[in-house]
Image (spheres, rainbow, N blue to C red):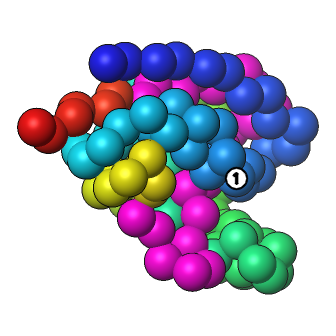
Amino acid sequence: MIKEFEIKTQKKYEMIDVTEKIQKIVSDINEGICLVYVPHATASVIINENYDPNICTDVINFLKEKIPEGKWLHDKVDGNAAAHIKSAILGPSETIPVRDGKLLLGTWQAIMIADWDGPKTRKVIVQVVECT
């Protein structure tokens, strides 16, 4: 089964928790795996803590410091090379096991879409493979 939804980011750098949306998609799955994927070259899917919002801020600030804007060859094309590099490092997907209709995430884990070149509308593709 494949489901899609969109999220709209409001800032240049933003991380949005999509765990609840994905949990609803897998709620009827007895056992399987769930792939969460963004078909964008300047966005990522990550799993990290959602309890403290400072974690998202820290990740964003770390990547802004380590991968600054305006110094890359691709910037001559459209000025967003740093966003491409951040996305390439973090990756466009995550895979989560599912059991009894629940994502098997840790206590503090959440699935987040990270936009490195917003604000934009981002597509999220969720593919669930049920094991029998």
For the point 14% across and 39% down, the residue is: 131
The reply to whether residue 95 is visible in this rendering is no
Question: In the structure shown, which secondary structural element does the residue marked by tag 1 occupy?
Answer: strand
Q: Is residue 123 above or below residue 12?
A: above
Left or right for 83, reference 9: left
Quarter occupied by the N terminus: top left
Q: Tell me residue 47's x, y (percent).
A: 50, 64
From the viewer's perspective, tell me whether residue 69 is left or right of residue 13: left
| Residue range (magenta) | 104-126
- Residue in the picture at 80% in, 35% down: 9
Q: Is residue 35 left or right of residue 68?
A: left
Q: How many marks?
A: 1
Q: Write down the residue under mark 1.
A: 17
Q: Is residue 118 above or below residue 115?
A: above
- In the displayed structure, does residue 91 sit left or right of residue 51? left
Q: Is residue 36 magenta?
A: no
Identify the residue at image location x=62%, y=50%. 19
Picture quadrant of residue 69: bottom right
Which residue is at the front of the view, 66 or 41? Answer: 41
